[in-house]
């Protein structure tokens, strides 16, 4: 028995499922999760001392790689000044200005402690601002675990096969309308019927919780038009895509401007941070200036702000994004070539530093339906072969992969060599 297996057995006695977030369990691939002890750059080291090339990056935050020296230094310095004050601090002002500078559609921003808080509040704000109850989301998009948003959700819910969670009153869930991602016609037809009652559309501008599915041309633009026509608030959930698809997020990359944006992951540099922001007129509906209530004991925490600010500052390196994007291209082209050579049907998607691969005969995957129809046996076998060979991928076919600035060409070469072995094993199944 490995130390990870020992720890997992012990963990299950005290923690539900042995994990503090379901996506960490290996339900999607079978087997026992790996317990990590430390991480540095592109690598993680498990409790048995084994090294992995990491393509999850703590589920998105570690775009600069693990244990980045500038983030570590800023965090240590902040710790020395005190862990939490529950008062305003200068760093919160600096942080807000930094976010506005990187994401110009954000005129005002409020910090929270997770992506879930950010999306939950953005929805409440949109409802308060418009005086409407209904919201529209997309099947397979995941926006955290607030009640209104756990309807036909992706990520761990898709992996576990329970897209709607018990515990959410039907009276609540009925206000959440769901339609098909990348299908603007379904959005238009539901708005034609109920548009005047819809407070907001919330969307992952690149879907990253049903594998990685970028928007088809015209989709995001169409959402903008529909919201303008019906006076609904357009919310881009950029918790995953923010600072990742490009420095200014998906809205910069695709040139479509939302009314509100939610942020998380990269914004905290590895600390628990989220944020929501957007048009001044809407943001000023939030307490204490406005009537919509939202608060947080630890929001804008000085240590978290120091880590996040250091991370956002490092993103200005002009070579960072081109380098990461080139590595994604090399990885995906290499995977495709090796799968083709082994006769394994595969197709890939990417958006900036996010990527996905699908075991399917389809040429391109653009829909939720296609993502769910992929060959799961191939995925599971590939996953475990890669894990054995020291490559750490998301343990589910319904999650995106993430590249960091710390991954080297040599890391990609090693990953591709491992993939060649894995595809050869799949060919024998
Ligand atoms: N929105 C999106 C797009 C996400 O990917 C996630 C988390 N994976 C969330 C919201 C929720 O963020 P958190 O887990 O920090 O609550």
Image (cartoon, rainbow, N blue to C red):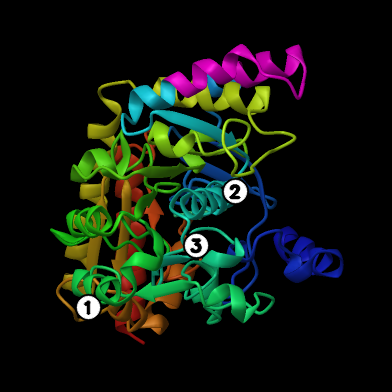
Q: Work out whether mark 2 precedes mark 3 in sequence or the reverse, and give the earlier one.
A: 2
Which residue appears farthest toward the right when viewing the image? 14
**Residue 234, magenta (yes or no):** no
Give the label, 1 or 3, closer to the camera.
1
Residues at marks 1 and 2 touching, judged by CB atoms closer than 8 Å: no
Residue 230: % across, % down = 27, 59
The image quadrant of residue 186 is bottom left
| Residue nearer the viewer, 179 or 39 | 179
Quickly name the residue at label 3: 387
Residues at marks 1 and 3 touching, judged by CB atoms closer than 8 Å: no
Quickly name the residue at label 1: 345
Q: Neighbour class for label 2 at 10 Å: few (<14), some, many (≥20)?
A: many
Left or right: 184 with respect to 212?
left
Could you tell me which residue is drawn at 75 percent across and 66 percent down? Answer: 18
Q: For numbered disc 2, what is the local secondary structure?
A: helix
Q: Work out whether mark 1 precedes mark 2 in sequence or the reverse, and give the earlier one.
A: 2
Is 299 above or below relative to 416?
Answer: above
Q: CA distance from mark 2 to mark 3?
A: 33 Å
Q: Which residues are magenta?
A: 73-97
């Amino acid at each position: 028995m490995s130390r990870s297996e020992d720890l997992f057995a012990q963990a299950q006695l005290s923690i539900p499922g042995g994990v503090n977030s379901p996506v960490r369990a290996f339900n999607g691939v079978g087997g026992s999760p790996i317990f990590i002890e430390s991480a540095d750059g592109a690598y993680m080291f498990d409790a048995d001392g084994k090294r992995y090339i990491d393509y999850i990056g703590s589920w998105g935050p570690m775009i600069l790689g693990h244990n980045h020296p500038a983030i570590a230094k800023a965090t240590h310095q902040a710790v020395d000044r005190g862990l939490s004050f529950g008062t305003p601090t200068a760093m919160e002002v600096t942080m807000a200005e930094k976010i506005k500078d990187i994401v110009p559609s954000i005129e005002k921003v409020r910090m929270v402690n997770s992506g879930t808080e950010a999306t939950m509040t953005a929805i409440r704000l949109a409802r308060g601002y418009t005086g409407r109850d209904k919201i529209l989301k997309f099947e397979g998009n995941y926006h955290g675990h607030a009640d209104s948003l756990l309807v036909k959700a992706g990520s761990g819910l898709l992996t576990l096969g329970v897209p709607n969670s018990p515990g959410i009153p039907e009276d609540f869930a009925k206000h959440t309308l769901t339609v098909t991602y990348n299908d603007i016609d379904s959005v238009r037809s539901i708005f034609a019927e109920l548009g005047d009652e819809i407070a907001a559309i919330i969307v992952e501008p690149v879907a990253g919780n049903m594998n990685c599915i970028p928007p088809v041309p015209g989709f995001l633009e169409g959402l903008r038009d529909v919201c303008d026509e019906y006076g609904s608030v357009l919310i881009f959930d950029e918790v995953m895509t923010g600072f990742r698809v490009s420095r200014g997020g998906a809205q910069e990359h695709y040139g479509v401007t939302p009314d509100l944006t939610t942020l998380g992951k990269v914004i905290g540099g590895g600390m628990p941070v989220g944020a929501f922001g957007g048009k001044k007129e809407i943001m000023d509906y939030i307490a204490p200036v406005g009537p919509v209530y939202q608060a947080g004991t630890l929001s804008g925490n000085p240590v978290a702000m120091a880590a996040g600010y250091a991370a956002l500052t490092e993103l200005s390196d002009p070579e960072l994004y081109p380098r990461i994007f080139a590595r994604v291209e090399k990885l995906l082209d290499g995977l495709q070539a090796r799968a083709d050579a082994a006769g394994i049907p595969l197709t890939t998607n990417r958006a900036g530093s996010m990527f996905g691969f699908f075991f399917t005969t389809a040429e391109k995957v653009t829909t939720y339906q296609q993502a769910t129809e992929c060959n799961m046996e191939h995925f599971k076998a590939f996953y475990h072969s890669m894990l054995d060979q020291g490559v750490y991928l998301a343990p589910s076919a319904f999650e995106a992969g993430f590249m960091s600035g710390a991954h080297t060409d040599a890391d990609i070469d090693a990953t591709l060599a491992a993939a060649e072995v894995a595809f050869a094993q799949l060919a024998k199944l």
